[in-house]
């Protein structure tokens, strides 16, 4: 079988012929013309249809002239790869298309695999087809081109990709391959890091696997990312997080002393100056400290760091310290020292009701905080300073 030209649309437009690669074209319209022909491969198109899509604001006769020039440029670009005399383009008086005898595209293969999967009743065979299809998708189709028809095409293909990915996640879970399901879901987040549907799948799979802590970390990572964009998780995602928190209550972790005698302290304090003073004071006594200056970062760091003690400011810019305390208590018995300028008895009582172990009123001497930390660690872990 003769070697073929392989036109790749996923992640950007590229033509391959063996080891030869063409990814730069004479001009943007030359690339757009090839992208349009490859997207609709193997169908041919009337010349006037191409004019309407590529030069919608142009008079018909002028558009026809531009198409002739662009076809010439495309032939010249394609001649830089492949074998001499190859007829990649099939161009007649009325229609233009790509030659199916010497051309293949990743998008056409993607569509073929998905159609086969849809008609395959055996789950194992379907999973193999879907796996092959999603591995072809490594970025938006025709990335780098911005015409209106390209944007619409990208959305259609992306929807099909995530539908296939979701089916694959479900099939893998039904086959009791939870780790494989997680791998597929995480691949989806590599494609779209803020796809909430896939984030929910990751959260749900962690929870089903008996790891609500990882599920909630996934939620807080998403929450922080969306917060940076001025957004927040959808009601469905927040509801799932609440359900997982309820599950975590049944699996609440009990703190254990560090194996290496290196106690980890998480400081959640929105005043960087105060947080660094505490960090330096505790660090000088051998504690490993990490600072977070808002609640969202603090929660994400908690799941990542797994600290032995938390110093928690009551007033934070995004969520209150009380809410952070409540969330931590759902999943862990780690010691918590609340820090606040509010000295009212009722404020302190509410903190204790939510699960705080100690209450320190600002301002305080760093040495006093060190003493309270050491005392709480002694009670919890038999810490010896």
Image (spheres, helix red, strand yellow):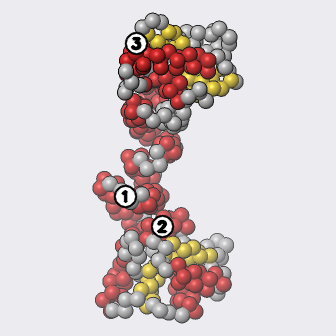
**Could you say whether the residue bearing mark 2 is in a helix, strand or loop?**
helix
Q: Residue 350: x and y, percent?
A: 32, 83
The answer to whether residue 214 is above or below residue 132 is: below
**Could you say whether the residue bearing mark 3 is in a helix, strand or loop?**
strand
For the residue carrying disc 2, how many other residues have a C-alpha within 10 Å: few (<14), some (14-19), or many (20+)? some
Q: Is residue 241 left or right of residue 385?
A: left
User: Are the residues at dot 3 and dot 2 in contact (C-beta closer than 8 Å)?
Assistant: no
Q: Is residue 344 left or right of residue 101?
A: left
Q: Which of label 3 and label 1 is nearer to you?
A: 3
Return the residue nearer the eye: 266 or 379: 266
User: Are the residues at dot 1 and dot 2 in contact (C-beta closer than 8 Å)?
Assistant: no
Determine the image quadrant of residue 81.
top right
Rendered residue at 53%/89% (across/down)? 369
Looking at this rendering, what residue extends furthest in the top direction? Answer: 93
Rendered residue at 40%/73% (across/down)? 317
Marks 3 and 1, the one that precedes in the sequence: 3
Residue indicated by mark 1: 231
Residue indicated by mark 3: 46
The answer to whether residue 57 is above or below residue 273 is: above
Q: Which of label 3 and label 2 is nearer to you?
A: 3
Could one spot residue 282 in this view of the protein? no
Return the residue nearer the eye: 227 or 203: 227
Q: Residue 258: x and y, percent?
A: 61, 73
Quarter of the image with the N terminus in it: top right
**Could you say whether the residue bearing mark 1 is in a helix, strand or loop?**
loop
């Amino acid at each position: 079988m003769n070697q073929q030209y392989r036109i790749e649309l996923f992640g950007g437009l590229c033509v391959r012929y063996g080891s030869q690669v063409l990814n730069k074209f004479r001009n943007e319209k030359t690339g757009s013309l090839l992208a349009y022909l490859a997207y609709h491969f193997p169908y041919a198109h009337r010349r006037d249809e191409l004019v309407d899509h590529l030069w919608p604001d142009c008079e018909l006769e002028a558009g026809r002239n531009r198409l002739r020039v662009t076809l010439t440029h495309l032939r010249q670009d394609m001649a830089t790869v492949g074998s001499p005399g190859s007829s990649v383009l099939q161009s007649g008086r009325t229609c233009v298309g790509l030659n199916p005898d010497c051309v293949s595209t990743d998008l056409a293969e993607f569509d073929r695999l998905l159609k086969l999967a849809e008609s395959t009743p055996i789950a194992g065979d379907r999973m193999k087809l879907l796996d092959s299809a999603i591995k072809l998708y490594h970025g938006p189709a025709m990335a780098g081109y911005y015409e209106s028809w390209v944007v619409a095409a990208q959305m259609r293909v992306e929807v099909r990709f995530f539908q296939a990915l979701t089916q694959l996640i479900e099939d893998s879970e039904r086959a009791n391959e939870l780790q494989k399901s997680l791998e597929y879901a995480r691949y989806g987040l590599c494609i779209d890091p803020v796809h909430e549907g896939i984030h929910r799948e990751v959260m749900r799979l962690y929870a089903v696997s008996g790891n609500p802590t990882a599920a909630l970390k996934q939620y807080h990572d998403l929450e922080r990312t969306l917060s940076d964009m001025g957004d927040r998780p959808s009601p469905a995602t927040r509801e799932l997080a609440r359900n997982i928190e309820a599950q975590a209550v049944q699996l609440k972790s009990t703190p254990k002393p560090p194996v290496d005698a290196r106690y980890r302290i998480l400081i959640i304090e929105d005043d960087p100056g105060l947080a660094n003073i505490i960090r330096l004071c505790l660090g000088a006594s051998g504690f490993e400290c990490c600072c977070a200056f808002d609640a969202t970062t603090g929660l994400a760091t908690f799941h990542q760091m797994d600290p032995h003690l938390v110093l928690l400011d009551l007033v934070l810019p995004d969520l209150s310290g009380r809410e952070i305390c409540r969330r931590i208590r759902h999943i862990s018995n780690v010691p918590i020292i609340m820090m606040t300028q509010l000295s009212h008895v009722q404020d302190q009582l509410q903190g204790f009701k939510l699960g705080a172990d100690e209450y320190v009123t600002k301002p305080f001497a760093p040495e006093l905080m060190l003493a309270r930390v050491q005392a709480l660690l002694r009670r919890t872990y038999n810490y010896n300073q």
